[in-house]
Amino acid sequence: MYQPILGLKGSSDRVQIDDRLQYQPTVYEFYTAASDFTTDGYKRLYDAVQYVQSRGISQIVLHHPMKFENYHSDVVAPEKYYPGLYRFIETTTEQLIRLGHDLNVQVLVHGGYSGAEVQHMVGLYPSVEAARQAVYDRLDRFKDEGGSHIMFENSIAPVFAYGHPDQEDEILAHHYRLAFDTSHCFIELHGDNAGLQRSLKHLAPDVVHYHLVDSLGQTHDSLQLGTGKINWAKVLPLLNPGATSIYEINLKDQNDCAEQMASHRYLVNLCHQLKEE
């Protein structure tokens, strides 16, 4: 069975990094922003990755920036209507892939986000299927460039969502290295634990990284484990034991990862309980 590992998330800011490193995590995931892709920002990010590596952490993930100007970084955005966003996603993904190859770290790109904005973007295509195909075409190209250094995360949107067996089969046919956000799938399924469990089991062999996050199953709430409605006792046995993971939890203070650590304690305690049963 999957054994909980300590995976923490923070920015390239040294205060945040040192806060996380005091707990000696196995995995560190960098939250990146547009500011990390200026000339100076990219150098700082590069140096920050090397700093974390110098502290003995070899499993590092670089999360593609979530936003560009007022938009989420939705790969479904057509170049014709969103030229600036389209180019931003292209150039930043290219920079991250280069960093991934140079420093032997992982790059995570979202297959989509959620909300009215992405719904509007999908509506610019002749059909939802055409929008999905545009996403697959783009991710296929990123996969070819990134190889074993890139993975793709599920959305809460009509494109690249987990929880629907037919769409999951489409995704599996592309042989992507998958990142699985538990809350995104749970929300996509409107709080259906059985559906989440089916999805976890179906996709597990192709999952290389998990975002372990609780949720009430309605909106993107990013809750501490044990405070939402996900049945973690049923989730734990379905996780790929060879994958990495982090706790992607909303923090009261970005310089203090207390909620991430509380989530880890919850999962470790639950794992002990399951072994004793």
Image (spheres, grey):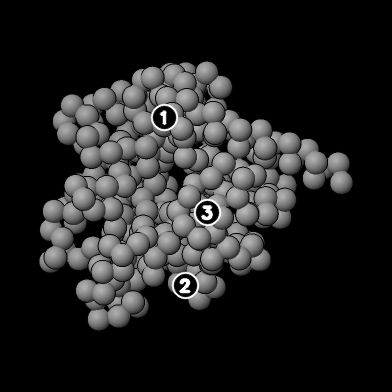
Could you tell whether 148 is left or right of 182 in the image? left
Question: Which residue, given by chain and number where applicable, does mark 3 sit on?
Answer: 183
Of labels 1 and 2, earlier in sequence is 2
Q: Residues within 10 Å of mark 1 (few under 14, many from 20)?
A: some
In three-dimensional space, the C-alpha distance between marks 1 and 3, rounded to whole angstroms, equals: 20 Å
User: In the displayed structure, does residue 80 sit left or right of residue 236?
Assistant: left
Q: Amino acid at mark 2?
A: Gln
Q: Residue at x 54, y 66 (%)?
A: 190
- The span from disc 1 to disc 2 (Cα, nearest Å) is 35 Å
Q: Nearer the viewer, residue 222 or 268?
A: 222
Instruction: Find out whether the residues at labels 3 and 2 contact each other: C-beta distance under 8 Å.
Output: no
| Badge 1 amino acid | Gln
Task: Nearest to the eye among marks 3 and 2: give it.
Answer: 3
Q: Dot 2 surroundings within 10 Å: few (below 14), some, or many (20 or more)?
A: some
Q: Indicate the quadrant where residue 140 lies.
A: bottom left
Q: Earlier in the sequence, mark 1 or mark 3?
A: 3
Which residue is tagged 2? 167
Dot 1 falls on a residue whose secondary structure is loop
> Does any portion of residue 147 appear in the rendered image?
no
- Reading the image, the residue beneath label 1 is 254
Q: Position of residue 216 (x, y in %)?
A: 56, 55
Kindly report the distance in space between the C-alpha atoms of the residues bearing marks 3 and 2: 18 Å
Tell me the kind of residue under disc 3: Ser
Q: Residue at the spot x=12%, y=66% of the render?
A: 80
